[in-house]
Image (tube, grey):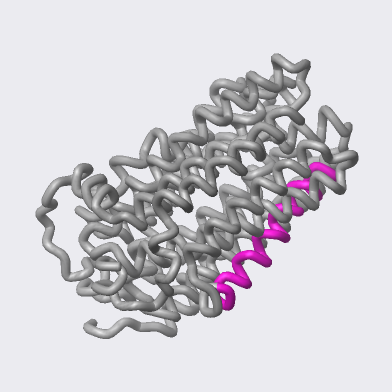
Amino acid sequence: MDALNRPTVGRLFIPGQIVSLFGDGLAVLAIPLLVVHLTHNPTAVALAAAPRMVGYLLAGFPAGPLVDRTDPWHVLIAADAVRAAIFLGLFGMAITGTGLVPVILALAFIAGAAGVFFETALTVVVRDIYRDRELLRTNSFLETASQASLVVGPAVVGLLAATAGSGAALLIDAVTFMVSLATLMGTYRSVPQRIRSGERRHRLRAEFRAGLRYLASSSIMSSLAVLQLITNLCLAATTLIVFFARDVFGASPGLVGVVAAGGGVGGILGAAMASTVAARYRPVPVCVLGVLLIGVALAVAGIAPGIWWLAASNAVLVWADVLASIVIRTLRQQTVPRELLGRVTSTTRSVVFAAGPVGVVLAGLLTQLDGNNPRPVFLAAAALIGVSAPVVWATGLRRHRGIPLHRSDEELVTA
């Protein structure tokens, strides 16, 4: 088969990813609630809310070369199989009451590492199938589905926790990855080998160093990576939101789900608006302003007088984060050569997410030292963003403020 069977892709690939993303939304609250039920240690709860960050620390660097060397569809299928098995195991622990916090965290981190391979391969697959404005629309659509899962997922987990127990959510999570796995296998057969391989050579030129070298040579990509790294370090404070809601405000599991869902609502709006905003405004200023807005939202969370203020600030910071992330992702897909895209994507995300676990541990420990009070952590994160974002803009990004999306690769590289 030489041509892409787009109707099959539309029927299976995108709906399968929507189901998979719903599973991610369930995990956002299901695992932290399982851990907070076993321990009231804020560091453990924060780590339970950060498997994606730890996953990039564990698997970020090998993910890119593996995706570039192999068929990315094989990576997608394997990652879903691993995640389905892990969540079945967590479900078994939840219903039998045999789960230990270190074991639960270890399994969550392995699932997060599998998710890293999945996200890296998905970036390449989407680039292979879609182009130009269709690429931005697809990124926005998938991110909208992801953020919608952060509304529906926590709400479902909160309801299940109050009725059937948190184990039911873990079982549903496993099923979503099984559904995604089935749709990927069905879609794989309709995608030509020419598209799956991207017509690239099988010999790598520098493995990890190629991604690092490209990142270092691209002024705009390296500056954006620095901005993302600082932002991710500060966003580690948000892993305390479940602890904040439960231990500071005494919220029920249902209200905790509402707070988490607030982030999902903001994320949906950010993803839905990304295509329009990117078409009307230059992407680099959009990213910097989005980061500054994250700082404002963190400050509001730090002084929040009640649970609804916490939910609203979570919505605003996720809105800004998602909008900026989609713009940066699309710039990367349009700029980086296809044969390097997997490595540059995983290298960038590994560098960026490496700050996450450090921030999570610091946030948890500082909260403990202050008598389990997370407010100063949110305020410190807001202050760090307020100082560092203007510095990155002035020293590295200001010169790229005029670059639009949808220019040719050559124009973007030389700009």
Examine the image and state in which quarter residue 371 appears. Answer: top right
Residue at image coords 78%, 33%: 244
Q: Is residue 97 left or right of residue 283?
A: right
The residue closer to the viewer here, 126 or 303, is: 303
- Asked if 256 appears above or below 368 in the picture, the reply is below
Magenta stretch containing residue 256, yes or no? Answer: yes
- Asked if 119 appears above or below 361 in the picture, the reply is below
Examine the image and state in which quarter residue 19 appears. Answer: bottom right
Magenta stretch containing residue 240, yes or no? Answer: no
Can residue 156 be seen here? no
Q: How many marks?
A: 0
Relative image position of residue 389 (x, y in whole percent): 54, 47
Image quarter (top left, top right, bottom left or bottom right) of the C terminus: bottom left
The residue closer to the viewer here, 74 or 314, is: 314
- Asked if 229 appears above or below 18 in the picture, the reply is above
Relative image position of residue 384 (x, y in whole percent): 59, 37
Can residue 373 be seen here? yes
Image quarter (top left, top right, bottom left or bottom right) of the N terminus: bottom left
Q: Is residue 381 left or right of residue 354?
A: right
Relative image position of residue 166 (x, y in whole percent): 73, 39
Residue at image coords 60%, 66%: 271
The residue closer to the viewer here, 120 or 364, is: 364
Residue at image coords 74%, 21%: 40
Relative image position of residue 84 (x, y in whole percent): 50, 46
Q: Is residue 194 left or right of residue 54?
A: left
Residue at image coords 44%, 84%: 7
Q: Main secondary structure of the magenta part?
A: helix
Q: Which residues are magenta?
A: 255-277
